[in-house]
Amino acid sequence: MEKIALSPEVSLSRLVYGMWRLGDDADTSPAHVQAKVEACLAQGITTMDQADIYGGYTAEAIFGAALKAAPALRDQIEIVTKCDIIAPAGRHAAARVKYYDTSAAHITASVEASLRAMATDRIDLLLIHRPDPLIDNIETGAALDALVASGKVLAVGVSNFRPWDFDLLQSGMTTPLRTNQIELNLIANAALTNGDIAFHQRQGHPLMAWSPLAGGTLLSASQTPLRTALHRIGAEQGTDWSAVAVAWLLRHPARIMPVMGTNSLERIAHLSDACRVEMDRQTWFELYTHAIEREVP
């Protein structure tokens, strides 16, 4: 599978395995989690996407238990994780309200907690999970710079940031921000026209796309023409609708990396089918036209 270079130290697989719902599976044993990772590796999917908050602050430890049981896996994968969301759950159960914390103290403590939970000495890519209205770009930037200098984090980026949020944080840093993980799929397609993708494409930042299948709403009743087109194209190419929807993202020249989340071993085994879908320009626009429910101007 194609690898996308973020920095001299870090390259990610074009498809990323998302571990958002890792703790929701009926089987969270190390052996079962290891089976998921190995099913990804068999297809060349080497990047695992985590966040401290996933599973109510449990998903990193579930993943870490698998890495402890099979330590050889660590050098075959890249670990992405995120921080700055504090919700009243898990180790933050005493919080009165959900909020964001981009203080140096919190970011540093969160990284240390993630390293312990995942039984690793490094995080390949650390993302600030959400824009913080109270961000001190100088303090936050210095904290991220220090983590990279320490070797505990190899590269840094953001998630859900708009261009101005990205620029503000970058202005307080010497280390380059390498990527932005945004919601992007056939239905949540505003980034194509609101300047988000253009901003990063111009600067050469590969993007990560969360919820590339729109949480299943791609097949809702209100999207009947889109649903029909996805199924038809999938049948024509010997695959299913989900591979076509992901291929639509892969077709974009911004080097988008879809983050694919599922607990089904059968579905994991077919994640890379999207890489084999042929998506010419007219097919891309056919799907886009159905998604926006009108002809392009």
Image (tube, rainbow, N blue to C red):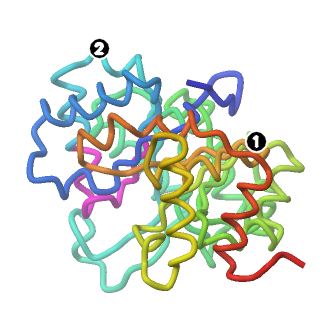
Question: Residue 280: percent from the left, percent from the top?
Answer: 75, 46
Is residue 280 toward the left or the right of residue 243 in the image? right
Circles 1 and 2, Cβ within 8 Å, touching? The answer is no
SS of the residue at dot 2?
Answer: helix
Which amino acid does the dot numbered 1 rest on? Pro
Rendered residue at 22%/73% (across/down): 93
Q: Is residue 264 above or below residue 294?
A: above
Quarter occupied by the C terminus? bottom right
Q: Nearer the viewer, mark 1 or mark 2?
A: 2
Depth check, front residue: 268 or 12: 268
- For the N terminus, the quadrant is top right
Residue 119 on image: x %, y %: 28, 31
- Whether residue 51 is in magenta: the answer is yes
| Pointer 1 or 2: first along the chain | 2
Q: Is residue 236 toward the left or the right of residue 35 in the image? A: right
Towards the viewer: 251 or 83: 251
Residue ID for mark 1: 176
Q: From the viewer's perspective, is residue 187 above or below residue 68?
A: below
Range of the magenta residues? 49-61
